Image (cartoon, grey):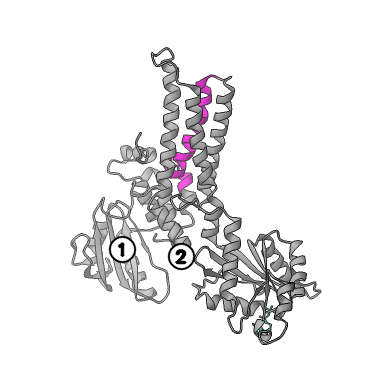
């Protein structure tokens, strides 16, 4: 069986219809698109990129001198095609058909940064016949032209959206095709089971005798086991992708905000402010070694009649309900215990008791007594930095014990779309194995479940790329990607 991606039906059909690989009928291309690919704002350079059959023609009207040598960044003047006015001096790189990101002829123009140069260059290429690209349209074309699998296209989106090194590393691995290779291997294994059954149906009286039903059952069982292993990586994948929600809880003045800041500072965090945070909950990502931690500082947990404070408490309760780890903070063991009791009503997440402001007590004489009272509490000081490393280690340890640790050679499932497809395949395999075991239905009828499992896996890797799937995947991309 081949380990190569199955032939892309729609792309093949479009090629047949459109001649030179132009996928107009599927919205995958045909015209020439252009976009500013870099984020807006002040910066050293910006990139205007163009892709499509007319990219070179458009460039010939705005880039002087033209043509540039392929794949060589060449200094050129960009002019408005109508007025001839200079839009910018820029580095232009030309990529030929079949040797570009999208597979189409592409031209990339590195303009000066800031909003004006790139906008003028984009206007020039649009004036010369290009169309402004939609979000994700470049990557979509790369997928449509077979330069990337759909899962690899998704991985590019994940690299861009990554807010931690571990999420970016996973996405890079996905771009390398680890998950796709594993899924295709499973699909091939299923096709072999199908072949065994077909052989049995076609040649029941062969010399070798019929295929032993146990052999089919065993092969199907192996595939189901591998599907289970992949599905089991999903919670860890989600954790790496989104970060583990670690919520600081405790009464006002317990030292939560100070601890929050100290943890961010101490971890030398790649701090990413998350949009949509309220005045009462501040969120930042700590790029911890094992998992990114989404640390949330919430409003104090206490009953209140003050409306605004109440809102804050509602926010913290919402966070607590979703938390993966709760840090119950307090200055004294009894405060921590009271917080833990309150949290238990809202959250089922594992809770780590944290005794704050230990610098105030470090010289004190109550240390022995505290040890007896609270052997499992982590003692920290935001002021002196004591215990912060230990606290982060405890968080990591807690997460590791609640989530399946993924074997190093197992690709990790990070996308809901992939998980859904794997679950469909797994459910079909369950049906298959049960019916096969019972042995009451004719083999061709039971084999329908194998077909459905194969189809689910093919949809995952993007072998059956309907418009609808592509729309869903690329809708969330940025323009110019
Ligand atoms: P929150 O209301 O729980 O967020 O508590 P804050 O972080 O705002 O701290 C309340 C008060 O305790 C502030 O005056 C802080 O300066 C003080 N505080 C917080 N952490 C420490 C600490 O580790 N050591 C000392 N000495 N004071 C602290």
* Left or right, 358 with reference to 166: right
Judge whether residue 451 can be spotted in this image. Answer: no
Which quadrant of the figure contains the C terminus? bottom left
Q: Residue at x 74, y 65 (%)?
A: 343
Q: Residue at x 58, y 72 (%)?
A: 390
What secondary structure do most residues of the magenta stretch adopt? helix
Residue 23: x percent and y percent?
A: 35, 45
The residue pinned by badge 1 equals 125
Q: Quadrant of residue 172?
A: bottom left
Q: Residue at x 26, y 59 (%)?
A: 58
Q: Is residue 174 above or below residue 352?
A: above
* Left or right, 314 with reference to 152: right
Is disc 1's CB within 8 Å of ligand 1?
no
Query: Mark 2 vs mark 1: which is more N-terminal?
Result: 1
**What kind of element bears circle 1?**
helix
The residue pinned by badge 2 equals 165
Q: Are marks 2 and 1 in contact (CB under 8 Å)?
A: no
Residue 14 magenta: no
In magenta, the rendered stretch is 442-470
Say few, some or many: other residues with alpha carbon within 10 Å of mark 1 (under 14 / 14 to 19 / 20 or more): many
Q: Which mark is residue 200?
A: none
Residue 212: x percent and y percent?
A: 47, 21
Say few, some or many: other residues with alpha carbon within 10 Å of mark 2 (under 14 / 14 to 19 / 20 or more): some
Judge whether residue 417 can be spotted in this image. Answer: yes
* Left or right, 311 with reference to 211: right
Q: Quadrant of residue 397?
A: bottom right
Q: Nearer the viewer, residue 441 or 410?
A: 410
Residue 193: x percent and y percent?
A: 45, 29
Q: Is residue 109 above or below residue 458?
A: below
Residue 467 magenta: yes
**What kind of element bears circle 2?**
helix
Outermost residue, top direction? 205
């Amino acid at each position: 069986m081949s380990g190569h991606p199955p032939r892309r039906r729609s792309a093949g059909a479009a090629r047949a219809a459109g001649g030179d690989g132009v996928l107009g009928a599927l919205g995958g291309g045909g015209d020439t698109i252009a976009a500013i690919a870099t984020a807006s704002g002040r910066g050293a350079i910006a990139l205007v990129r163009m892709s499509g059959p007319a990219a070179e023609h458009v460039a010939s009207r705005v880039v002087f001198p033209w043509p540039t040598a392929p794949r060589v960044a060449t200094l050129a003047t960009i002019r408005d095609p109508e007025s001839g006015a200079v839009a910018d001096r820029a580095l232009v790189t030309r990529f030929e058909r079949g040797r570009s990101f999208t597979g189409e002829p592409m031209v990339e123009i590195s303009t000066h940064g800031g909003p004006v140069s790139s906008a003028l260059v984009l206007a020039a290429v649009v004036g010369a016949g290009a169309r402004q690209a939609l979000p994700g349209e470049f990557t979509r074309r790369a997928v449509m032209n077979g330069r990337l699998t759909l899962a690899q296209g998704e991985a590019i989106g994940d690299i861009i959206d990554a807010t931690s090194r571990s999420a970016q590393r996973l996405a890079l691995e996905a771009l390398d095709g680890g998950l796709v290779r594993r899924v295709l291997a499973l699909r091939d294994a299923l096709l072999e089971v199908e072949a065994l059954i077909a052989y049995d149906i076609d040649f029941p009286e062969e010399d070798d005798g019929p295929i032993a039903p146990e052999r089919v059952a065993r092969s199907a069982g192996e595939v189901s086991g591998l599907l289970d292993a992949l599905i089991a990586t999903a919670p860890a994948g989600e954790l790496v992708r989104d970060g583990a929600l670690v919520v600081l809880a405790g009464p006002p003045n317990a030292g939560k905000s100070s601890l929050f800041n100290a943890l961010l500072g101490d971890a030398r965090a790649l701090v990413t402010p998350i949009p949509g945070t309220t005045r009462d909950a501040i969120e930042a990502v700590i790029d911890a070694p094992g998992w990114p931690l989404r640390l949330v500082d919430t409003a104090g947990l206490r009953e209140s009649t003050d409306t605004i404070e109440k809102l804050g408490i509602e926010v913290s309760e919402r966070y607590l309900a979703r938390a993966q780890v709760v840090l119950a903070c307090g200055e004294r063991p009894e405060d921590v215990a009271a917080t833990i009791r309150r949290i238990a009503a809202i959250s089922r997440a594992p809770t780590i008791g944290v005794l704050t402001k230990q610098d105030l007590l470090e010289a004190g004489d109550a240390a022995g007594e505290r040890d007896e009272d609270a052997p499992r509490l982590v003692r920290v000081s935001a002021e002196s930095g004591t215990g912060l490393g230990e606290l982060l280690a405890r968080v990591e340890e807690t997460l590791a014990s609640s989530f399946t640790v993924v074997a190093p050679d197992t690709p990790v499932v990070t996308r809901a779309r992939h998980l859904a497809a794997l679950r469909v395949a797994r459910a079909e395999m369950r049906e298959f194995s049960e019916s096969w075991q019972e042995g009451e239905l004719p083999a061709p009828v039971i084999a329908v479940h194998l077909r459905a499992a194969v189809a689910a896996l093919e949809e995952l890797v993007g072998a059956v790329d309907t418009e609808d799937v592509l729309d869903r995947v690329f809708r969330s991309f940025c323009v110019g990607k």
